[in-house]
Amino acid sequence: KENRTRETTTTTTARRRHKKSARAFVEREKEKEGETEKRVDMLTAAPPTTRTSSPTTTTTTMSARRRTMSMGSSCAFVRATKSRGTRGSAGGRRSAPSTVRVVSEGTGRFIVGGNWKCNGTRASVKELVQTLNKNVPQIEKNCDVFCCPTFLHLPYVKENLDSRFSVCAQNSWVEADLVDPEHHYDSTTGAFTGEISAEMLEDLEVPFVLLGHSERRTLLGETDEIVGKKVAHARYHGLSVVVCIGESLEERENGTTFDVIFKQLKAVAKEIDDREHSSWGSSVVIAYEPIWAIGTGKVATPEQVQEVHSKIRNWLAENVSEDVAKATRIQYGGSVNASNCADLAKLSDIDGFLVGGASLNGDDFAAICNASSVHYKAVGR
């Protein structure tokens, strides 16, 4: 734009020189993009490398468990060079295919979660646990894994699932209208029939809790503000949190995707105690789940997912801190399965997956976990 502004005050000869230089610049950029694509192809074709480090196991106090779960986060960034597109995708613009460029590397670990939702009988859960345990030797060591059984099955799963997997609760309670300047949100009464508190999960040494899932937002009316309070309350009691965000099909089509997810993020950032911000990246995982892709069989394209994930990371950098933006792991969830996980894992801002229906098949879930190696190769680690 600056160049075009200058053109209005230059001579015809200067314009010609400028156009010639611009054409030469475009040609150089095309050559660079070609070299980058070759580099990414070489990385993804390289022999797999296995990271041998794994989180320290602890069975002592909850504070020790918090230290265990404060694992680093994948923070490799990518930029996508895109030609102008048409209206219609996230943020109101449908872009042409992107050229992915790895511009920095993270040091954290891929993270995959299985959300079992409201599924399972004693027999089916027992069989699933046995299948997952059988697959432990085949699961790459460079990936953190958690499973979210129902509350009824949680004690059994915690007792019988191999320690390679962490256990995650599907929700925890907070008193929605409670005002607390310290952002702890501890209720003074237990008169909340049918609810599970963060204190109970802390007592059971359940390390993770899943909050803000779209099904709870849309079916049970959980607002952004309630989700923010739940995150703050869970963190106060030492739980690592997986907080879900995402837009509906209508919001995507009308171009308000980023307005929606930034509002959801702001509600969380507002409630997390300032003392927590320094460790947010290791204790809060963000799961981007476009509502229109959950359980529908529809999957956002890798370019669409990368665009949203990079915007999330940029928002964290601008509104929380650069350190939090780099450390926070951002999962993708939305009909992820054993067939499409490898293509998605190649993108650097996709730090893992939150898996729904496919997590009920132990063999498929193990295959999705192993997409971690595809991710590490793609970002050159």
Image (cartoon, rainbow, N blue to C red):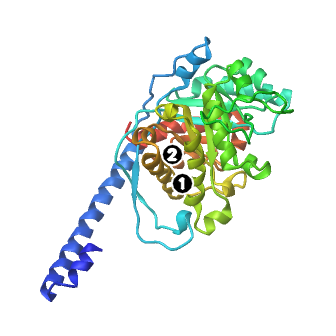
Looking at the image, residue 211 sits to the left or right of residue 269; the answer is right
The residue positioned 82% from the left and 34% from the top of the image is: 120
Pointer 2 residue: 350
Query: Label 1 is placed on what type of residue?
Result: Val
The residue positioned 63% from the left and 53% from the top of the image is: 246
Closer to us: 144 or 285? 285
Q: In the rendered picture of this protein, how many numbered marks are placed on residues?
A: 2
Above or below for 276 versus 309: above
Numbered mark located on residue 19 in the image = none
Tag 2 secondary structure = loop
Rendered location of residue 374, percent (x, y) = 48, 40
When asked about the image quadrant of residue 131, the answer is: top right
Above or below for 23 versus 147: below
For the residues labelled 2 and 1, say whether their Cβ atoms are less than 8 Å apart: yes
Q: Of label 2 and label 1, which has the lower sequence position?
A: 1
Looking at the image, residue 70 sits to the left or right of residue 234; the answer is left
Above or below for 241 versus 334: above
- Disc 2 crowd rating (10 Å Cα; few below 14, some 14-19, many 20+) is many
The residue positioned 67% from the left and 19% from the top of the image is: 205
Query: Label 2 is placed on what type of residue?
Result: Ile
Pointer 1 residue: 305
The C terminus sits in image quarter: top left
Q: From this viewpoint, which residue is outermost toward the top?
A: 60
The N terminus sits in image quarter: bottom left
Rendered location of residue 302, percent (x, y) = 52, 55
When asked about the image quadrant of residue 136, the answer is: top right
Tag 1 secondary structure = helix
Rendered location of residue 251, percent (x, y) = 64, 64
